[in-house]
């Protein structure tokens, strides 16, 4: 290998290393932000709290995000992407049957990767601010629409297969409201556990789609 080519390879490796380091730092700060939101709430979270939680200097926080608002937007974007990727992945693995896909969608909502106390608390903090912050609404709005449309399509398919008498749009709203309500109960810390919430969600879809779903899974 010629010297010039060798230097080019070294330079590319260095660039990738710097990029990886930058992404690692950003992720550290986002995770620390989630921790702070869960512990302190939205208003009380500061850049200093995040820096200390990540074990990094406050200058690093300013370098990557410049402001608390930018950091919070990046954190919400990260959580929204994680949630969307998680349920989309669950659907892909479930196959084509509507019953299997609905079961997978419900199970994904209460998976340990997504449904944790710290993440639920962080979601709660953002939801409390969403009404007065259009940026937060915009970040999650498109994903909420896609999720709702997915549930409507599943309810439509199940109705066609089973001859149910419900209106798919109304049934989809009922399913989504049930899942959101169970998340809210978990956020409130009233003693509801993730396992109890999942069991309740399963009871709901068993009652709503008796020809397709049993307590132990799709029929």
Image (cartoon, rainbow, N blue to C red):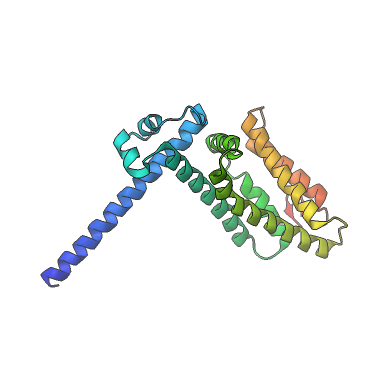
Mark count: 0
Q: Is residue 168 visible?
A: yes
Work out whether residue 76 or residue 99 is closer to the camera in this orientation and state it: 76
The residue sitting at the left extreme is: 3
On screen, residue 1 above or below 37: below
Q: Residue at x 70, y 39 (%)?
A: 181
State the residue at coordinates (50%, 29%): 43
Against 55, residue 98 (above or below) is: below
Looking at the picture, tell me which residue is in the foreground, 58 or 87. 58
Q: Nearer the viewer, residue 91 or 59?
A: 59
Q: Is residue 113 visible?
A: no
The answer to whether 174 appears left or right of 52 in the picture is right
Q: Quadrant of residue 164?
A: bottom right
Q: Where does the image place residue 182, in percent across and percent down from the top left?
A: 69, 38
- Image quadrant holding the C terminus, namely bottom right
Name the foreground residue: 75 vs 24.
75
Q: Position of residue 19 (x, y in %)?
A: 31, 54
Q: Residue at x 55, y 44 (%)?
A: 136
In this picture, is 203 found above or below 128? below
Q: Quadrant of residue 100?
A: bottom right
In the picture, the quarter occupied by the N terminus is bottom left
In the image as oriented, which residue stretches furthest toward the bottom?
1
Among the 4 quarters of the image, the one containing residue 5: bottom left
Residue drawn at 36 percent across, 33 percent down? 51
Q: Position of residue 99 (x, y in %)?
A: 73, 58
Please state the horizontal and vertical placement of residue 23, each as a whole percent of the image. 36, 49
């Amino acid at each position: 290998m010629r010297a010039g080519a060798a230097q080019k390879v070294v330079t590319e490796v260095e660039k990738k290393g710097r990029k990886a380091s930058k992404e690692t730092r950003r992720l550290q700060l986002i995770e620390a932000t989630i921790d702070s939101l869960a512990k302190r709430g939205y208003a009380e979270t500061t850049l200093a709290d995040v820096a200390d939680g990540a074990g990094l200097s406050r200058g690093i926080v300013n370098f990557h995000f410049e402001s608390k608002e930018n950091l919070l937007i990046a954190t919400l974007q990260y959580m929204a992407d994680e949630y969307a990727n998680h349920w989309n992945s669950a659907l892909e693995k479930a196959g084509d049957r509507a019953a299997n896909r609905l079961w997978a969608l419900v199970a994904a909502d209460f998976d340990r990767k997504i449904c944790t106390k710290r993440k639920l608390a962080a979601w709660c903090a953002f939801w409390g601010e969403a009404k007065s912050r259009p940026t937060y609404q915009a970040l999650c709005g498109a994903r909420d629409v896609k999720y709702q449309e997915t549930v409507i399509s599943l309810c439509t398919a199940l109705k066609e297969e089973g001859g149910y008498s419900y209106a798919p749009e109304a049934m989809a709203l009922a399913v989504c409201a049930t899942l959101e309500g169970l998340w809210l109960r978990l956020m409130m810390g009233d003693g509801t556990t993730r396992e109890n919430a999942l069991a309740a969600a399963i009871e709901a879809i068993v009652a709503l789609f008796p020809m397709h779903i049993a307590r132990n899974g799709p029929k």
